[in-house]
Amino acid sequence: MNQPDLSAMDHAAKDDLIRFLLAENAELKSRITALEVRLAKDSHNSSKPPSSDGLRKPAPKSLRQAGQRPKGGQKGHKGSSLERISKPDRVIIHPLPTTCDACGNPLSETHVSEVRQVFDIPPQQIEVTEHRVLEALCTCGKVHRSDFPEGVTATTQYGPRVQATVVYLTQHHMLPILRTAQILRDTCGVALSPGAVVRMIRTAADNLAPAVADIADAVREAHVAHFDETGMRVAGKLHWLHTAATSHLTWVGIHTRRGQEAFDAFGILPGFQGTAIHDGWASYRKYDCRHGLCNAHHLRELTCIHELYGQRWAKNMIDLLVAAHRDVADGPLSDDRMAQINADYTTILAKGDTIHPIKRRKDGSAHRKQSYPTNLLRRLREYREDVLRFLSDPEVPFTNNIAEQAVRMPKVKQKISGCFRTFDGAAAFCTIRSYLETLRKQGVDLLHALVQSFQGETPQPTLG
């Protein structure tokens, strides 16, 4: 604004100017604070991934109380050191000289004084099996011909162990296709083309698709399921990788959309009647099921408000949620303890509201843009039951870590190998990933399961 002529203004005009300047100053200070907070956000006080922290890594701050668990291996933890076996595959005896080097007398009787074992991988070499079918002509004129085994369909082809290893390395350990081919060439002498690797991946996805459909059905019927989504680049465009998981099941899918359109297409949430654990994304609210919010997100946001805004109420809420989580881990809460937690929760929200009241328009309606702390306070208030659902339902966890873990490795895949070139390739990855992650949770040997799948006998995951 232009500099006003103060000498020409009466007291009322000056009062109006002062009020205008004070309001403008407050607005500018609020905007500066918001910008400073945005710049100061990192993985420990927001949902930004650790990879975005760059070289300025934040100092880790654990919410665990000092002395709660000592550092290092815990009492009763079974070690995993290398131990000798009773029947080695090969024994090498290191002989003594036949005579004593001091007196020259012969050394007749010897005994084993010490044993040391070396564990190593034997040299690997590709094994080629040739199948020959026989043919004979009967005197009656009929030609008899034997049959190739099931699965032997080409003049030359790779066997189930090679195919399973390729899928295991690319889809579970996230190795790029070219690097996988190089590893097999260097270790086993298998010369694979990138096209052959892609065909093996697609075959595995086709083999595993029925089992993955059963996994989706089982997640839909679960009492508690975790949901999350993250961006993935497919054919140069932004897509969304979605996951639905339980403690022993994982389902992953890819879609062009992030919200309800994708959820409806996958068909898990529309029929889900249990408790959906998620991060509060609005699209989840469109489904008629119980909801539980991830408190790890809340703790990070509260940490941001406490550290960057200097708000004591945020630290009080952190302490309350952490203490409640610790208490419920020891067993069901008493009615008195439950009432105390709820009373403290209400008191803390009231303190936050006095510092960050909801901005309203002249007509009394809430302003569309609210401050970061105000939005968090509103969420904690409006969805209070979902925030504290872990207190009343022992199957509802404190966080949504199960779903976040399910999307973490696909992000590693993207970081190592770049984006997926085709939608079909991304869909195949999701199918295989769903199967392997589910079996990993259930303690199944993944490589052996893939070998069996390529042999036509796919092991089925436990769904109950």
Image (cartoon, helix red, strand yellow):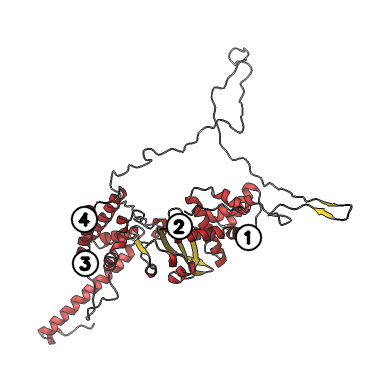
On the image, numbered disc 3 is attached to which residue? 353
Q: Residue furthest right?
A: 139
Q: Residues within 10 Å of mark 4 (few under 14, many from 20)?
A: few
On the image, numbered disc 1 is attached to which residue? 199
On the image, numbered disc 4 is attached to which residue? 340
Q: In 3D space, how far apart are the residues under numbered discs 3 and 2 (Cα atoms)?
A: 36 Å
Relative vertical location of residue 115 with respect to residue 60 in this rendering, above or below: above
Residue 406 screen position, x and y as percent: 45, 57
Q: In 3D space, how far apart are the residues under numbered discs 2 and 4 (Cα atoms)?
A: 35 Å
- Decide which of 355, 287 is in the foreground and name it: 287
The kind of secondary structure element at disc 1 is helix
Q: Residue furthest bottom?
A: 8
Check if mark 3's residue and mark 4's residue have beta carbons within 8 Å: no
- Decide which of 344, 420 is in the foreground and name it: 344
- Decide which of 207, 202 is in the foreground and name it: 207
The kind of secondary structure element at disc 2 is helix
Q: Is residue 417 visible?
A: no
On the image, numbered disc 2 is attached to which residue? 406
The kind of secondary structure element at disc 3 is helix
Q: In 3D space, how far apart are the residues under numbered discs 4 and 1 (Cα atoms)?
A: 60 Å
Q: Residues within 10 Å of mark 2 (few under 14, many from 20)?
A: many
